[in-house]
Image: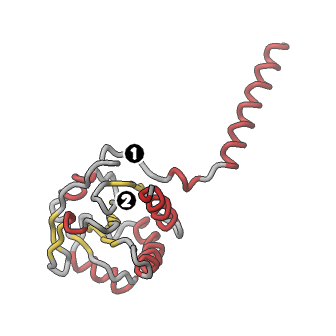
């Protein structure tokens, strides 16, 4: 009987400690998902925008680049869109603002145009008609967001929808780390 009480007390203390850790932890500091690409040069990407403009990722060196994999019927993509619009606006006000690109995942150009006309977002939308970009980055499902540093190295992968402030905080953290 005494051993059972001690065991129950030990389990209770462990559970209390876990709750305390969860309460005081900052969930945004470890938002990134694992990928073998992290810290590696970004895949070579050459495609066109839905406006038929050429795009080559290697030509973006010197700039922070954010890719957001997107489909116009994806509910989490739709939910995160206002946060992305605000992020892009904030980046546009910075001298070192990140370049933002939507990578279209299994969607028609017309549907993408209609979505962006209705919901805002005046940035380039990249075609990925054969899925090669998604495969190169190892995209599991949309939405998924990737940050590439000015040297062309993959710095962060975020699975799922982002919320207000998340990308701003992650960019600040990455910029700070790149200055040292």
Mark 1 lies on residue: 34
**Which residue sits at x=20%, y=75%?**
49
Residue 126 versus residue 117: which sits nearer the camera? Answer: 126
Residue beneath the point at 14% across and 74% down: 54
Residue 44 point in image, percent of width and height: 18, 57
Q: Residue furthest front?
A: 180
Give residue 166's position: percent from left, percent from top. 51, 64
Q: Point out the frontmost of discs 2 and 1.
A: 1
Q: Is residue 36 left or right of residue 161?
A: left
- Where's residue 24, x and y in %? 69, 49
When asked about the image quadrant of residue 125, the answer is bottom left
Q: Earlier in the sequence, mark 2 or mark 1?
A: 1
Q: Quadrant of the N terminus?
A: top right
Residue shown at 76% from the left, 20% from the top: 7
Quadrant in the picture for residue 11: top right
Q: Nearer the viewer, residue 56 or 113?
A: 56
User: In the rendered view, does 109 fall on the left or right side of 116?
Assistant: left
Residue extending farthest to the right is: 2
- Classify 149 as above or below 2: below
Q: Is residue 118 above or below residue 65?
A: below
Quickly name the residue at label 2: 144
Query: Regarding mark 1 in the picture, which secondary structure is present there?
Result: loop
Quarter of the image that includes the C terminus: bottom left
Q: CA distance from mark 2 to mark 1?
A: 12 Å
Crowding at dot 2, Cα within 10 Å, few <14 / some 14-19 / many 20+, comes out as many
133 lies left or right of 34: left
As drawn, is 84 to the left or to the right of 150? right
Q: Residue at x 80, y 25 (%)?
A: 9
Q: Name the foreground residue: 128 vs 180.
A: 180
Q: Which mark is residue 160?
A: none
Element type where label 2 sits in the image: strand
Percent position of residue 33, x then y? 42, 49
């Amino acid at each position: 009987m005494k051993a059972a009480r001690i065991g129950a007390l030990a389990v209770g203390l462990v559970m209390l400690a876990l709750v305390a850790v969860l309460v005081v932890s900052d969930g945004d500091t470890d938002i990134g998902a694992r990928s073998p690409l992290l810290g590696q040069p970004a895949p070579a990407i050459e495609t066109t925008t839905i406006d038929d403009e050429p795009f080559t990722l290697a030509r973006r060196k010197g700039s922070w680049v954010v890719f957001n994999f997107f489909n116009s019927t994806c509910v989490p993509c739709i939910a995160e869109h206002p946060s992305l619009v605000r992020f892009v606006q904030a980046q546009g006000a910075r001298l070192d603002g990140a370049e933002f690109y939507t990578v279209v995942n299994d969607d028609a150009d017309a549907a993408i145009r209609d979505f962006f006309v209705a919901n805002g977002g005046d940035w380039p939308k990249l075609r990925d008609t054969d899925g090669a970009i998604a495969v190169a980055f190892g995209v599991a499902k949309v939405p998924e967001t990737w940050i590439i540093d000015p040297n062309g190295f993959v710095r962060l992968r975020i699975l799922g929808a982002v919320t207000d402030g998340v990308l701003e905080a992650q960019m600040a953290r990455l910029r700070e780390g790149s200055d040292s």
